Image: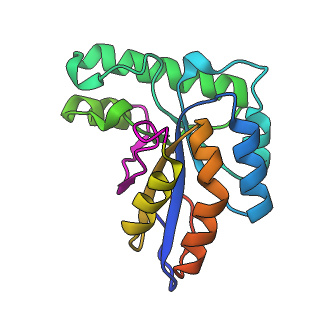
Amino acid sequence: MLPPGGKKTVMLTFDDGPGRVLPEILAILQEEEIKAAFFWQSRLLHPGRPWRKVLDHGHIIGNHSCSHKNLARLPFHDQLADLSRCKEKIESLTGQKVDYFRPPFGQYNSDTIAAANQLGMETVLWRIASLDWELKDDPVMILNYVIDHLEDRAIILLHELPQSVEILPALIQEIKKAGYDFGLLDR
C-alpha cells in the first residue's frame, strides 16, 4: 500500500468529506508539504467544494460510498451500485480515475471487497484510528492516542472535522519528531 522506503513512514487519510473544514486541512498540508488521501462520500460532492485544489496539490481522492451505510449489511448488487455511483460521480466531476475505496465504519465483507475489485478499486483500511469522532471534546487525547500508536507504514484515519483541524499541525510536528516521513498510497 505505502511504497517501500528506508525511513519510517506513515500516511494521513481523511474520511467523510468533502466538508467545510477541507480548505483549512489543505492549507496545513500544503504548508507542511504533505500529501494525503481523502475518502469522500459522493453525496457531499458538488462543484462548489474545492476538489480541484485537492488534486492540484497532489492528494488522492478515494471512494467512501454514496450512502455511508454499513455496506456489509447490504446484498452484493446494492453494494456494487453504491460504490459505482460514488466512483462515477467523483470521476465525472474531477476527470480523475478513482483507484481506492474505504468502507464506511471499516465494515465490509467478501461482497464489499468483490464490488470494489470489480470496479477496479483497491480497498484501503487503516492501522491507527484517531478516534477524532469520539474524542471531539478532547483534542489533546486525539493527538496523544495517535502518537502513542505510531508504527512504521501505519495508515492514520482522521475525519474532516474541526477537532482534526485543531490538532493537525501538532500531530504533524510530533510525527516528524518521532522520526517519521509522510507517504502516500501507491498502487
- Magenta stretch: includes residue 164: no
Instruction: Judge left or right: residue 7 versus residue 44.
Output: left
Q: How many numbered marks, from 0 up? A: 0
> Residue 171 at what x, y percent from top left?
58, 62
Residue 37, above or below 88: below
Q: Position of residue 155 (x, y in %)?
A: 44, 58
Q: Quadrant of the N terminus?
A: bottom left
Outermost bottom residue: 6
Which residue is found at the position 80% from the left and 60% from the top? 31
Q: Is residue 169 left or right of residue 11?
A: right
- Give the residue drawn at x 34%, y 33%: 105
Q: Is residue 64 visible?
A: yes
Q: Can residue 130 be found in the magenta stretch? A: yes
The one nearer the camera, 174 or 106, is 174
Q: Is residue 1 visible?
A: no
- Corner quadrant of residue 112: top left
Viewed as shown, does residue 110 lie left or right of 179? left
Q: 147 and 61: which one is in front?
A: 147
How far across and how far down the image is residue 136, in percent?
49, 38
Residue 61, x across and y down, in percent: 60, 40
Q: Is residue 147 left or right of residue 180?
A: left
Main SS of residues in magenta: loop
Region rendered in magenta: 118-137
